Image: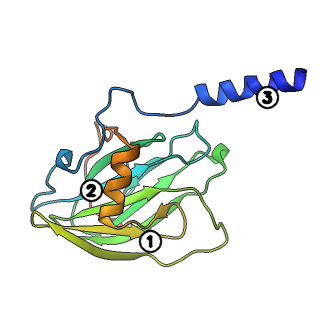
Amino acid sequence: MIHRLLRMSLTVVLLAGCATPPKDAPVFSAQMLPPPGTDYALLVVYREIVPPLAYKPTVSVNGEEAAELPNGAFTWIKVKPGRVSVKNDWSFASGNPAGAVDMEAQAGHYYYFEITGDSAPSIMTPVTIAAHVISNGATFHTAMQGRGFSPEEETTATGRLKACCRYVPANEDYKPVDYTSPSG
């Protein structure tokens, strides 16, 4: 009986501690994405349900913290065209390793990233960027990497975003910066 009560209490605590966006946050629609314009590309980053539920990974672009994403959330992040390093970093206590993608971003384009758990911690696959549907003059892309990010076709990504995700704004103090090589 005590074991059952402890298990039920733990379940309640875990659900109460689940990181989620506000219930009144807008749900995803492609129309709510701002146009990336001629000076920027737009990263659309989302997270469905990735354990541990109480932790929010931090998404950084070129070393600048851009957003924290709870489960069932998405955000968009403006980036300067050219070399871009995107990273999602989890708290050490979460047990999830960081994921990173280095890519070339083109102004006027959208790039989709799904934050995922680490399904194969010993395998690192190369990053690939693939152009997808052209819509309203903008090319949609998907980036993938073996850890932390999962590939999605634009139509699949937007379908999943509609089903799962509410908008969480990027950090107010985030400003797009140029890529700086780790070696200097």
Q: Position of residue 91 (x, y in %)?
A: 59, 45
Apparent side of residue 70 relative to residue 67 in the rendered image (left or right): right
Q: What mark, if any, has residue 97 been given in the picture?
A: none
Which type of secondary structure does the marked residue at label 3 adopt?
Answer: helix
- Amino acid residing under circle 3: Arg
Instruction: Give the residue number, with chain letter if any, for mark 1.
Output: 183
Work out how far the residue at label 1 is from the one at label 3, CA to CA, in angstroms.
49 Å
SS type, badge 2: loop
- Tell me residue 38's x, y (percent): 9, 62
In which quadrant of the rendered view does residue 87 lie? bottom left
In this view, the mark in front (1 or 3): 3
First in sequence, mark 2 or 1: give its number: 2
Q: Quadrant of the C terminus?
A: bottom left
Q: Residues within 10 Å of mark 2 (few under 14, many from 20)?
A: some
Q: Quadrant of the N terminus?
A: top right
Question: Residue 7: which numbered mark, if any?
Answer: 3
Question: Decide: marks 2, 3 in contact (CB < 8 A)?
Answer: no
Which one is nearer the viewer's eye here, 58 or 35? 35
Q: Which residue is mark 2?
A: 177
User: What residue is at 32 percent from the left and 76 percent from the top?
Assistant: 130
Left or right placement of residue 6 versus residue 76 in this view: right
Q: Is the residue 176 above or below the residue 145 in the image?
A: above
Q: Quadrant of residue 22?
A: top left
Name the colour scheme. rainbow
